[in-house]
Structure formats: structure tokens, C-alpha cells
Image (cartoon, rainbow, N blue to C red):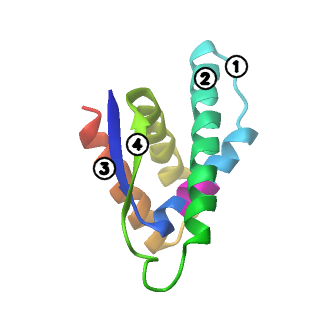
Amino acid sequence: MKIQIPLDFEQLKIVFNLLENAYNIKTETRAEKTNMSILIDLCDKFQIKYNSKRKDLDLLNSRKKFKMSLKFHEADTLRMFLAFFLDSVHLNDLQRSKISKLHNYIDQKTI
């Protein structure tokens, strides 16, 4: 099952920057290692999308939404990851709002 996630460039940039921190997370249990594997795949996926959208970026389409397709387990792991970072990372109000909206959207779609 796939889930289409609407993003704007700013959300993509914030999520990509957060996902890059996933490489620094220590894992011990089997579940943590599984989630880490999914997060690394997501980081690669977001990096490809970020690089392609950054090339096309200009003032007119910086707020334009586009869709990103994620498998159910990827979306659910991303939801858990975003929830963790919403509570623990110092984000400004705009970033926190954008990530919170994305988290809530994914939460609704993965129920």
C-alpha cells in the first residue's frame, strides 16, 4: 500500500535535514535496527527528491506543493521519527508548524 504525501519545498528541506541526523542515532534492539534501516532508505529517497526540486526552485514555485509516494511502512516510520523530533529538536515556530502538519497528515493516512 502506498501513501501520497503532499509537500512543499520548505517541508522537504526540513525533513531531509532531520533525516540526515538519523545516521547518528544509536540502535540496540532489533526493532530499532529495522526502523533505522527504513530511515536510511527514506533519507536517500528524500535526498534525491530534494536535489531534483532544488534545481527547479525559483520564487514562483517555492510554495508549490508536490506529492511524494511512500510505502506504508516508510510513512509510518517517518511519522514516528517526526514525532520524536518535534519534541526533542530546537525548531523555530514555522518549521515546527510545517513538520506538525506533515506529521498529522501522515498520522491520519496511516490509521
Residue sitting at x 60%, y 68%? 54
The span picked out in magenta is 13-17
Give the left or right position of residue 43, taking residue 3 as reference. right
Q: Nearer the viewer, residue 29 or 110?
A: 110
Tell me the amino acid under the disc marked 1: Glu
Residue denoted by label 3: 104
Crowdedness near tag 1: few (<14), some (14–19) or many (≥20) residues, C-alpha within 10 Å: few
Residue denoted by label 4: 69
Tell me the amino acid under the disc marked 2: Glu
Residue 28 shows which numbered tag?
A: 1
Which marked residue is nearer to the observer: mark 4 or mark 3? 4
Labelled pair 1, 2 in contact (Cβ < 8 Å): yes
Tell me the amino acid under the disc marked 3: Asn
Crowdedness near tag 2: few (<14), some (14–19) or many (≥20) residues, C-alpha within 10 Å: few
Query: Please, what secondary structure does the residue beneath circle 1 have?
Result: loop
Main secondary-structure element of the magenta-colored stretch: helix
Sequence-earlier tag: 4 or 3: 4
Magenta stretch containing residue 3, yes or no?
Answer: no
Q: Quadrant of residue 2?
A: top left
Residue furthest out toward the top: 30
Which marked residue is nearer to the observer: mark 4 or mark 1? 4
Residue denoted by label 2: 32
Sequence-earlier tag: 4 or 2: 2
Query: Please, what secondary structure does the residue beneath circle 3 have?
Result: helix
Residue sitting at x 65%, y 35%? 40
Please indicate, yes or no, whether residue 7 appears anywhere in the rendered image: yes
